[in-house]
Image (tube, helix red, strand yellow):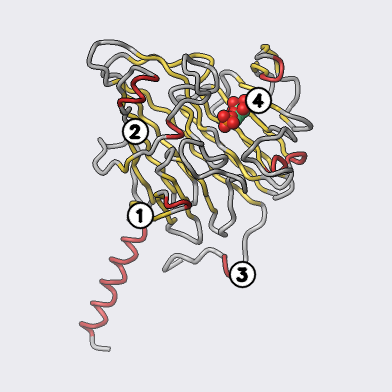
Amino acid sequence: MGQSCYLAFVFIRSITMMMMLFSFVRGEVVKGINGLDKVVLRGTRGSSAAEIYLYGAQVTSWKNDCGEELLFLSSKAIFEPPKSIRGGIPICFPQFSNHGPLHDPHGFARNRVWSVDSDPPPFPTSSANKAFVDLILKPSADDLKIWPHSFEFRLRITLGPGGDLMMASRIRNTNSDGRPFTFTFAYHTYYSVLNISDVRVEGLKALDYLDNMQNETRTTEQGDALTFQSEVDRIYLSTPSNISILDNGKKRTYVIHKDGLPDAVTWNPWAKAILDLGVDEYKHMVCVEAAAVEKPITLSPGEEWRGSLEISAVSSSSCSGKNAPRKLLGN
Ligand code: TA6
């Protein structure tokens, strides 16, 4: 190889490595179940990936470097408006459960078709070396009849280089008549676990919670960790920013970091019959939801609220075989 060829080779290889290290990728829109549009994000390493339906802006799949699914999605999930999709990360807005004026528990954002936001105002965090998609929801004329407020809800969903999943919401009051509005909110995340009986949620010790099994009676957590032996439906109040879910069966820990969302809802329905949940599937899911419920958020016109969730999954065993993470060039 001549010297000029060699220099060209070194130059191209350096540029490729720089691009791999500092690139960001916008997700592509493809057809999903029942012809609904979904966005696929592919990580820069291994088999990590995420899928997001424009219907509900709902993440329905999040896979680690080994290609293992980290979110629970019901085998009976209905991908057909107006039913919301059972599993993944439904977004509860402008109301969590019955904490607000709407008849519809959990609000309408989870059963509206969002749009890809091609030119959002800059997000505070960098998108370098990450795959992401920006989505936006604005109310339709029918939505305004249900909740008479104009808003812009921008959501950036990011798959980080280590396979972490980030959800960053920005909600702005765009009422032109000077009226404030008030809302409650949750990222209603369904995590995949091997067996709910072998799961602990840590970070809730000594906190007060509203127990939905007792008409939201205020109670204080007595245990070191929350475990599950029957239906659990609680709103833990003013929690720390970090909460962990330890799945002993899969030897995996989900680490949750939240900002702007003081509360944490924990839910497992146990054997309760739910139309779009398979028999016994409750064993393989746990909801731990970054939320703002106890103190609803009020925005004046022009004001913006931000609430984010960052989740990572740490496994004690590494993957091997065909799904093993590809090594980065030069590593
Ligand atoms: O987040 C817990 C909860 O509010 C429970 O009370 C339970 O009903 C669950 O959400 C599911 O609600 P959904 O409307 O999706 O059936």
Disc nearest the viewer among 1 and 3: 1
Q: Is residue 276 above or below residue 237?
A: below
Residue drawn at x 62%, y 34% as measured from the top left? 287
Disc 2: CA contacts within 10 A as few (<14), some (14-19) or many (>=20): many
Location of the N terminus by quadrant is bottom left
Among the two numbered marks 1 and 2 on one chain, the one whose residue lies closer to the N terminus: 1
The residue to which callout 4 is attached is: 204
Residue drawn at x 42%, y 68% as measured from the top left? 330
Measured as percent of width and height from the top left, residue 202 is found at 67, 32
The local secondary structure at tag 3 comes to helix
Among the two numbered marks 4 and 1 on one chain, the one whose residue lies closer to the N terminus: 1
Mark 4 and ligand 1: say if the CB distance to the nearest ligand atom is below 8 Å.
no
Disc nearest the viewer among 4 and 1: 1
Measured as percent of width and height from the top left, residue 171 is found at 35, 26
Return the mark for residue 321.
3
The quadrant holding residue 112 is top left
The local secondary structure at tag 2 comes to strand
Among the two numbered marks 3 and 4 on one chain, the one whose residue lies closer to the N terminus: 4
The amino acid type found where label 2 is placed reads Leu
Disc 1: CA contacts within 10 A as few (<14), some (14-19) or many (>=20): few
Among the two numbered marks 2 and 3 on one chain, the one whose residue lies closer to the N terminus: 2
The residue to which callout 1 is attached is: 28
The local secondary structure at tag 1 comes to strand
Mark 4–mark 2 Cα distance, whole angstroms, equals 33 Å
Q: Is residue 8 above or below residue 215?
A: below
In the image, taking residue 1 as reference, residue 54 lies left or right, namely right
